[in-house]
Amino acid sequence: MDFVFIGALAVFFVLCWGFAAGCDKLGGKQ
């Protein structure tokens, strides 16, 4: 398995989720 590719997807997913959660907590300006 390509762990680098899997790791990249995992990081991307976490960043997207964290960004969405952060924006929601801030009031959803963007």
Image (cartoon, helix red, strand yellow):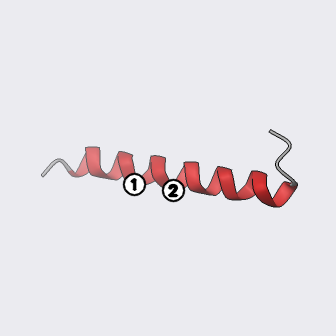
Question: In the figure, is residue 19 to the left or right of 23?
Answer: left
The disc at residue 27 is none
Counting labels gives 2
Could you tell me residue 11's position as x and y percent? 45, 51
Mark 2 lies on residue: 14
Residue labelled with disc 1: 10
Q: Is residue 25 above or below residue 11?
A: below
Left or right: 6 in relation to 13: left
Mark 2 neighbour density, 10 Å: few (under 14) some (14–19) many (20 or more): few
Q: Which amino acid does label 2 sit on?
A: Val
- The residue under the point 22% across, 52% down is 3
- Looking at the rendered structure, the secondary structure element under dot 2 is helix
* Front residue (pair 10, 4): 10
Residue 5 percent coordinates (x, y) = 27, 44
Q: Is residue 29 left or right of residue 5?
A: right
The residue that appears at 58% across and 55% down in the rendered structure is 17
**Which residue is rendered at x = 17% and y = 47% of the image?**
2
- x and y, in percent, of residue 28 in the image: 82, 49
Outermost residue, left side: 1
Tag 1 secondary structure: helix
Residue neighbourhood size for the residue with mark 1, other residues' Cα within 10 Å, grouped as few (<14), some (14–19), many (≥20):
few
- Label pair 1/2, CB-CB below 8 angstroms: yes
Three-letter amino acid code at disc 1? Ala
Residue at position x 39%, y 54% from top?
A: 10
Q: How far apart are marks 1 and 2 (CA)?
A: 6 Å
Vertical placement of residue 24 versus 2, above or below:
below
For the C terminus, which image quadrant? top right
Decide which of 29, 15 is in the foreground and name it. Answer: 29
